[in-house]
Structure formats: structure tokens, C-alpha cells
């Protein structure tokens, strides 16, 4: 008489299974395979062309699919955790342990411990006892238990609890619910709250005790395990640890919940996650779930938009990441944008000022107080903000910080011992670029001694931020004439800093140019100009000069060519002539850009990268050198061959645009050098990959 036990609804074809104490569980499929004695094969396993050695333990939902001339061989005394996948032709050595969710693509040496996707060697298993496993007595007890409490398959799922399933529990087809309290498992069995949904093809194994609170949803193909093995002993004795799931928890598809886990009220476990006892969450690709902080500099919308693009790509690549944006500039507008992609936001504005397009930032007297105390100090390296961020990073258990040109965030990360990525559109702060004479010629009254201090402090502070970030990424191309003496050049050569191209949101919408023009009352043959005023203004009168220059330019052109229309993104609500549509701000302007013929704009770098990536003809202009942060960018664009205008001279702009209207074949000339800024358009994807690599490297070091 065979001592082997095969559960109901198991399929076995063309296979040889030892009659000695092997157990194959429900919904498993075995074909063309040889199974040794004292082997355990869990629920929903799939084996084909596999040779399984003696005393091997194969947990639930393992996939072991060899090929006719490329068998999988698993030696004696091996333990495969839940949902392990083994590639054809792999040979797993004696006594190896393969962690839950691992994808094994290479041969495994004896007594190795392998985890991850693909599987990586972690350490060698050290055996304390050489007693060999035998299922004989255990299976004898199981047979008696099955006689007393036979499994039931009502409703399309398997019930191995020996008890009726509560009516408030909705169970999908192909699901297995197994485990009960017994002498062997004194803490075993299930406690179910009300209104619980368990979807198709899940495995809930409750021999160690499983409690599920009310209003909880467990999505398809999820595995919850309450038993394990002590791998320090060759016999792999079973261990039990209760799993507790509180109310209002949602567990995504293909998740694995391991023994000892407690999921608190309201938690969400993303698809493909593996949840460990210490509440470390990994995706099935092996990446540890992390909490990422995004900290844009609080002076302009561009810093927010860059980090929004990165957040979208992070969520797309790995939805297990928890992402929080710490916002200052235009908090209300950008909170909605970040929240729409599942990113939490926290308002960290300290003085109530959250829109630097309103009013003047500087005074004509350029000294330590006006520049450092009132502008650069609060927005670049702010001791009060550093302390606040240290508090918030600690409270929110932040694992990695991504800062857009905010050295305060890098300092806070450094204090907390957190890895960080500094995103920068600049290789130096603009104030450190210009000499005293340059700024005096621009219209400033410069304090000689203060300026020396400002110059030194700005340069040293920014370089400190570059050096102390784990990695630096930039969307700005290196220009040797401008950058060959900078510290940034060294960082690029060392690959501590990398150029990633435009860090912009992906252009996924199929905009209909005719529909957009129709909504704007712009005819198909009209020449449509989009004019954009900068978000960070050193002097309010400079912004007003740019607004008026764009309006005057339009009026001049419209007198000669009535088929000209303009959309003015003015940062203010202005009264404008007929033919101009005035908007204060438009966060998502891709459709508008693709529907226009020409853009007149400030050279804010996020705008530069968007236009370059989309290949929209543009003239970049500033109203005054006093806007030195944009003067810096205008110089770079001129060196790169872009079309620029200094002074917002409406007469010059009118002449240029009329020439383009009369000779539309010249419009592509404006985009001829765009590839220098946008050799590719997926910079956000590259940054997200870099963040993933930093996290994965850190996780391996922790293991």
C-alpha cells in the first residue's frame, strides 16, 4: 500500500512518483516528471520535465517547467519558497534554499541560499543538525484529519478548514483556504471579519493562524502563508507564525504575504509585492518597497514639473514605491497634479510665499541682506527648512530623497543618513557665474565686499550639495566654453553627475490640432503664437515689460497680418487686445504647443527642454539682464545655436516673426540645434532607472 498522498483535483501524467510519504496538494499539475520520496508539493504547483530529489519541500504556486531535452533537476533536501520559478535546464544542488518569489535562471550550488529576480546568491546555508526529514508520521496524521474533516469544493474553491465558510466571505474560483486549529497547530485556523473579498486563484494557508479584518480585499493570485521551515536544520522542521490583517486593507494581485506579518488598518499592498515579517515590502522583481521624498526648490513651477515627471515614471516602473512631494511653489496647483498620480503632498512653505511670479524678489542694491538673507538663503540652503525636513523625513520614514536644486534637502538627507539624488539644471548658481562689473552693467548697485562673500558662499554651498548627493543628474548639456573651469566638469568625468536629457512628462496624448484651435477660436490657416512669461521674477517691472512687449509685438503683427492670433500665458490676468487669449498659467500645455506655429518665451530650463523635445519653433527672450538667472540660461542657449532675444525689443521681435510668417519654410531653422538639449526625450525614465538602481544596491547591501 502506498504511503504517498495525492489530494483531490491534482493532475498527474506520464510521471513516476515515489510511493513513500510524498504529498501532492490540490490544483497542482505534474507531467513528465520523477518525484522522490518524502517530497512535499504545495497547492497550485506546475511541474513538467522535472526530476525532484528526496525530502525536497516545494511551497505553493511554484513553476518548474523543464523541456524534453532540457530537464530541471532538483537535488535532495532542497526547499523552494512560495511562487518560485525555475528556468529550463537549471540544476539545483543538494540542500539549497530558494526564497519566495525568486526566479532561478542559473544552476545553484549545494547549500546555497538564493533570492531575487533573477535569483542571486546571498550566503551558504549552515546546517546544525543532519537528521533527515521523513513525512511518515505527519502524513499519517493528515490522513486521519482528512477522514474527519474532508476537503470541500463547493462554489469553485477548495476549503480545507473543516469548517463552513462564513456567508460574509466572498471567495473566488480556484482559491484554496487551508488550515485549522489542532494539536500540531494550536494557534492555527482563521478569524474572518465582515465583508471580505478574496478573488480568484488565491491561497490562504492558516495553519499558523490567520486573522482578516472587515472590508478587506485580497486580489487575484495572492498567497498568504503562516508556516515556514527552519533552514538551519537539514530536516527543515515546520515553524508557525500568525498573520494579522486589520480592517480596510487592500492587497493587490500576485502578492505574497509571509509568516509573522501584521498589516495595519487601511494599508495598501501593491501588485506583485512580497511582504516580510518586518514589514519590508518588495516587488516580485526583488526591489525593496521604499518611501521616496521629492523636494523641489520653492521658487518656480519648473522645479515642480521636473519632479512630477520623475514621480510619474517612478510610479509607472514600480508602483510599490510610496512617493511624497514636499511642495512650496504653487502648492495648491501642483498638489492636485501630484495627487492625481498617487503621490502624497506636504506643504512646507514657511513664510506663506508660494508664488515667486508675484512681486519683486530683489532690490537694485545687491548686498548680503538683499540677496542671501532674502532670497538665496531661504531657497537654497535654509537652516530652518533643513531642521523641518529632518523632522519630516524621520516621521515619514523616508528612504531616499530626490531634490530639484534644493541643497537644504541634500543636507537634511545627509543628517538623516539617507541616500539622495540632486536634480539640477545648472552647473553653478548664476550669481557665482557673473562678475561684479557684469551685474553693475545690468543695473545693480553692488556692494564690493558683500559680493566677494556672496560669490564664495554660493559656489561652496552649491558644490557641497553636488558632492554630498549620492548621485547628481542634469538635463543641461555641457558647453566647454562655459563649463570647462567648473567643479561640475570633474563630477561629469567621474560619472558622479550624469546628463540624462529632458526631464519632462511623457508625451502620451494624441492631441487633435484642429480641435484645440477650434476651442480657442483659431482658424486652421491662422498663425498662432504662444507667448509665455517666466515664473520666477527678480523685478516685477521686468515681468511687466515682457508682458507688454509680447502684447505690443502681437499688435504690430496683427495690423499687417490679421490672421495672427496669440495665447499669452502671462502669470497674471491682464486686459488684452482682441486676438489675444490671456491665461495666468497652464500646467499641461503640450496640446497648445503642438497646435501653435511659434513660441515666444522666457528661457526657463524646463520650458527649453519641453520645446526642444517636442521640436516646437521658439524664440527665447528676456526683458533685462537684471533677471540674471535667465540671462545665464540665455547665454547657454546662444552658445548652443538657439534663437534668442535680449531686451524683449518688440520692434526686433515683430521683424523676426513677420519674416517667419512670410517664409514659413524658415521655421524649422529655429529647431536645428534642439538635439543638443534633447538627444532623446526620456530623461525622467533615465532618472527613475537610476533611482531604482540606487535602491536595489542599497537593498543588496542590507541583505
Image: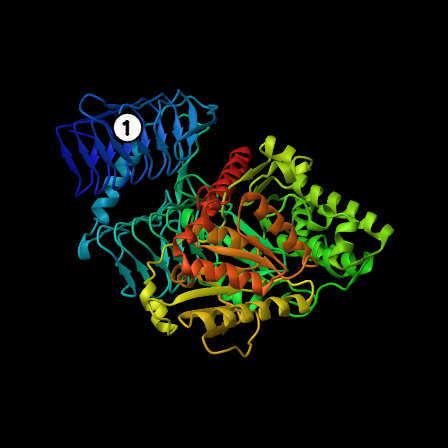
- Write the residue at 70% across / 67% down: 360
Q: Is residue 519 left or right of residue 691?
A: left
Where is residue 242 drawn, in percent x and y?
43, 49
Q: How is the image coloured?
A: rainbow
Where is residue 554 drawn, in percent x and y?
50, 69
Q: Along the line of sight, which residue is nearer the eye, 638 or 172?
A: 638
Q: Is residue 22 left or right of residue 557?
A: left
Where is residue 175 drawn, in percent x and y?
25, 51
Asked whether residue 260 is in view, the answer is no
Q: Along the line of sight, which residue is nearer the eye, 445 or 401?
A: 445
Can you name the residue that lies furthest to the left here? Answer: 14
Where is residue 304 drawn, in percent x and y?
55, 58
Q: Is residue 115 left or right of residue 290?
A: left
Which residue is labeled 1 in the image?
38
Q: Along the line of sight, which residue is nearer the eye, 128 or 450?
A: 450
- Write the residue at 37% across / 61% down: 216
Amino acid at each position: 500500500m502506498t504511503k504517498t498522498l495525492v489530494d483531490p483535483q491534482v493532475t498527474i501524467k506520464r510521471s513516476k512518483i515515489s510511493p513513500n510519504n510524498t504529498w501532492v496538494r490540490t490544483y497542482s499539475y505534474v507531467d513528465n516528471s520523477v518525484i522522490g520520496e518524502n517530497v512535499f508539493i504545495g497547492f497550485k504547483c506546475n511541474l513538467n520535465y522535472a526530476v525532484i530529489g528526496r525530502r525536497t519541500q516545494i511551497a505553493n504556486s511554484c513553476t518548474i517547467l523543464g523541456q524534453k531535452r532540457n530537464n530541471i533537476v532538483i537535488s535532495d533536501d532542497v526547499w523552494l519558497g512560495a511562487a518560485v520559478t525555475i528556468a529550463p535546464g537549471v540544476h539545483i544542488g543538494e540542500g539549497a534554499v530558494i526564497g519566495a518569489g525568486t526566479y532561478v535562471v542559473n544552476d545553484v550550488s549545494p547549500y546555497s541560499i538564493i533570492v531575487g529576480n533573477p535569483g542571486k546568491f546571498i550566503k551558504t546555508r549552515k546546517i546544525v543538525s543532519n537528521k533527515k526529514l521523513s513525512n511518515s508520521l505527519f502524513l499519517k496524521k493528515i490522513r486521519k484529519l482528512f477522514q474527519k474533516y474532508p476537503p470541500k469544493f463547493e462554489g469553485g474553491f477548495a476549503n480545507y478548514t473543516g469548517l463552513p465558510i462564513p456567508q460574509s466571505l466572498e471567495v473566488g474560483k480556484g482559491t484554496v483556504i487551508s488550515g485549522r486549529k489542532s494539536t500540531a497547530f494550536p494557534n492555527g485556523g482563521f478569524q474572518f471579519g465582515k465583508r471580505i473579498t478574496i478573488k480568484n486563484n488565491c491561497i490562504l494557508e492558516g495553519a499558523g493562524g490567520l486573522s482578516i479584518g472587515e472590508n478587506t480585499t485580497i486580489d487575484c493570485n495572492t498567497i498568504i502563508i503562516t508556516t515556514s521551515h527552519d533552514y538551519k536544520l537539514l530536516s527543515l522542521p515546520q515553524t508557525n507564525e500568525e498573520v494579522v490583517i486589520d480592517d480596510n486593507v487592500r492587497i493587490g494581485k500576485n502578492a505574497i504575504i509571509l509568516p509573522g506579518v501584521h498589516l495595519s488598518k487601511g494599508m495598501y499592498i501593491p501588485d506583485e509585492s512580497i511582504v516580510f515579517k518586518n514589514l519590508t515590502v518588495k516587488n516580485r522583481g526583488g526591489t525593496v518597497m521604499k518611501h521616496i521624498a521629492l523636494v523641489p526648490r520653492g521658487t518656480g513651477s519648473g522645479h515642480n514639473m521636473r519632479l512630477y515627471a520623475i514621480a510619474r515614471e517612478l510610479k509607472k516602473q514600480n508602483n510599490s514605491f510610496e512617493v511624497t512631494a514636499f511642495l512650496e511653489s504653487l502648492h495648491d496647483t501642483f498638489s492636485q497634479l501630484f495627487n492625481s498620480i498617487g503621490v502624497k503632498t506636504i506643504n512646507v512653505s514657511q513664510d506663506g510665499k508660494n508664488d515667486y511670479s508675484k512681486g519683486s524678489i530683489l532690490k537694485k542694491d545687491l548686498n548680503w541682506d538683499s540677496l542671501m538673507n532674502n532670497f538665496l538663503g531661504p531657497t537654497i540652503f535654509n537652516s530652518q527648512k533643513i531642521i523641518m525636513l529632518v523632522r519630516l523625513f524621520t516621521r515619514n520614514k523616508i528612504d531616499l530623497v530626490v531634490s530639484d536644486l534644493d541643497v537644504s534637502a541634500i543636507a537634511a538627507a545627509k543628517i538623516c543618513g539617507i541616500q539622495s539624488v540632486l536634480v539640477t539644471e545648472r552647473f553653478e548658481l548664476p550669481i557665482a557665474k557673473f562678475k561684479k562689473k557684469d551685474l553693475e552693467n545690468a543695473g545693480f548697485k553692488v556692494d564690493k565686499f558683500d559680493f566677494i562673500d556672496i560669490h564664495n558662499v554660493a559656489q561652496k554651498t552649491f558644490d557641497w550639495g553636488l558632492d554630498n548627493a549620492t548621485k547628481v543628474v542634469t538635463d543641461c548639456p555641457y558647453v566647454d566654453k562655459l563649463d570647462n573651469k567648473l567643479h561640475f566638469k570633474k563630477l561629469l568625468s567621474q560619472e558622479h553627475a550624469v546628463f540624462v536629457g529632458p526631464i519632462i512628462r511623457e508625451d502620451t496624448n494624441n492631441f487633435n490640432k484642429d480641435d484645440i484651435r477650434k476651442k480657442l477660436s483659431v482658424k486652421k490657416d491662422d498663425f498662432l503664437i504662444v507667448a509665455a512669461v517666466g515664473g520666477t521674477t527678480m523685478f516685477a517691472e521686468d515681468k511687466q515689460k515682457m508682458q507688454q512687449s509680447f502684447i505690443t509685438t502681437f499688435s504690430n503683427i496683427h495690423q499687417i497680418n490679421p490672421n495672427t492670433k496669440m495665447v499669452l500665458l502671462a502669470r497674471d490676468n491682464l486686459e488684452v487686445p482682441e486676438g489675444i487669449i490671456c491665461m495666468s498659467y497652464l500646467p499641461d500645455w503640450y496640446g497648445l504647443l503642438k497646435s501653435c506655429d511659434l513660441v515666444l518665451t522666457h528661457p526657463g530650463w524646463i520650458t527649453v527642454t519641453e520645446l526642444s523635445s517636442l521640436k516646437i519653433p521658439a524664440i527665447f527672450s528676456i526683458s533685462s539682464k537684471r533677471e540674471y538667472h535667465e540671462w545665464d540660461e540665455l547665454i547657454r542657449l546662444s552658445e548652443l545655436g538657439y534663437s534668442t532675444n535680449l531686451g524683449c525689443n518688440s520692434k526686433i521681435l515683430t521683424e523676426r516673426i513677420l519674416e517667419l510668417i512670410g517664409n514659413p519654410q524658415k521655421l524649422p531653422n529655429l529647431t536645428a540645434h534642439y538635439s543638443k538639449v534633447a538627444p532623446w526625450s526620456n530623461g525622467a525614465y533615465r532618472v527613475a532607472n537610476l533611482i531604482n538602481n540606487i535602491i536595489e544596491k542599497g537593498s543588496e547591501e542590507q541583505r
